[in-house]
Amino acid sequence: MYIPRHFHQPDIEPMHTLMRTHPLATLVTLGPRGPDANHIPLHHCPLPAPNGTLCGHLPRANPAWKEHLRDSDVLCIFHGPNAYISPSWYATKQTNGEVVPTWNYTTVHAHGRLRVIEDADWLKAHLEQLTNTHEASLPKPWAVSDAPADYTERLMRGLVGIEIEVTRLEGKWKVSQNRPDADRAGIVAGLRGLGQRDSASLMSELVDKS
């Protein structure tokens, strides 16, 4: 991933936070026909330090887990808040007009080796953990045990677990760090006006630190 110096995110904790709050990842594997991409939720575990481990599952019918070349890394791409940035929000537009649109975004690339897990107990524990994590904020959380046991066991037979120990993390926070303070303040106001709260919050933190 191309990362200009001013967009580089060097800190692991913000990257871990993005991976946990935006868990739907693009899993890129390398097979006999070249790169393959699948979109699956991945649960981030902080161990082993410093980068942690990603756990997920795939349908057995998906060839990615069988065809991936075992001696090559996989790439997991996590997308955080993103938004179109209008040049009309820049204070600079009023001074010299030298402004153009852009797109602000945050992303994390996690690299590591893929391990396939066909152990039923591991898979059940993983599914319960994944479900409990994402049901926790709901008023009446659903649990795997709410469904008939024979039904979930039948479904689980059609899945395989995957585990990726992360060997390298890359973070890119492209949130207009290269713009003047007045332009960044204008972006915050513009995003808030459109209801883009997540992106506006990121920009607001940047303005406050400047």
Image (cartoon, rainbow, N blue to C red):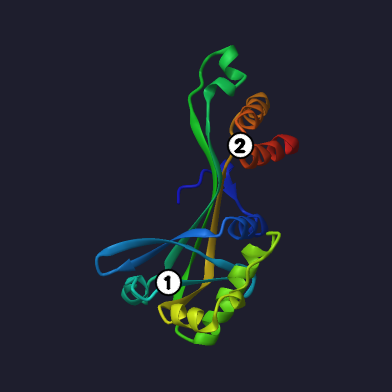
Residue type for callout 2? Gln
Residue at horizontal 63 percent and vertical 25 percent from the top: 183
Query: Where residue 156 sits in the image (x, y, percent)?
Result: 46, 79
Q: Residue furthest left?
A: 33
Dot label at residue 58: 1
When asked about the image quadrant of residue 44, the answer is bottom right
The C terminus: image quadrant: top right
Taking depth in this image into account, of 62 and 85 the one nearest to the observer is: 62
**C-alpha span from label 1 to label 2:** 32 Å
Residue type for callout 1? Leu
- Above or below, 147 relative to 44: below
Residue bearing the label numbered 2: 196
When asked about the image quadrant of residue 193, the answer is top right
55 on left or right of 155:
right
Taking depth in this image into account, of 194 and 106 the one nearest to the observer is: 194
Q: Residues within 10 Å of mark 2 (few under 14, many from 20)?
A: some
Residue at horizontal 62 percent and vertical 72 percent from the top: 143
Query: Where residue 103 sits in the image (x, y, percent)?
Result: 50, 36
8 on left or right of 181:
left
Dot label at residue 9: none
- Above or below, 110 relative to 1: below
Q: Residues within 10 Å of mark 1 (few under 14, many from 20)?
A: some
Q: Is residue 135 visible?
A: yes
Q: Secondary structure at mark 2?
A: loop
Query: Where residue 59 sits in the image (x, y, percent)?
Result: 40, 72
Residue at horizontal 54 percent and vertical 37 percent from the top: 83
- Above or below, 25 relative to 151: above
Q: Is residue 116 visible?
A: no
Q: Residue furthest top?
A: 95
Taking depth in this image into account, of 64 and 50 the one nearest to the observer is: 64
When asked about the image quadrant of residue 64, the answer is bottom left
Query: Where residue 48 sits in the image (x, y, percent)?
Result: 62, 75
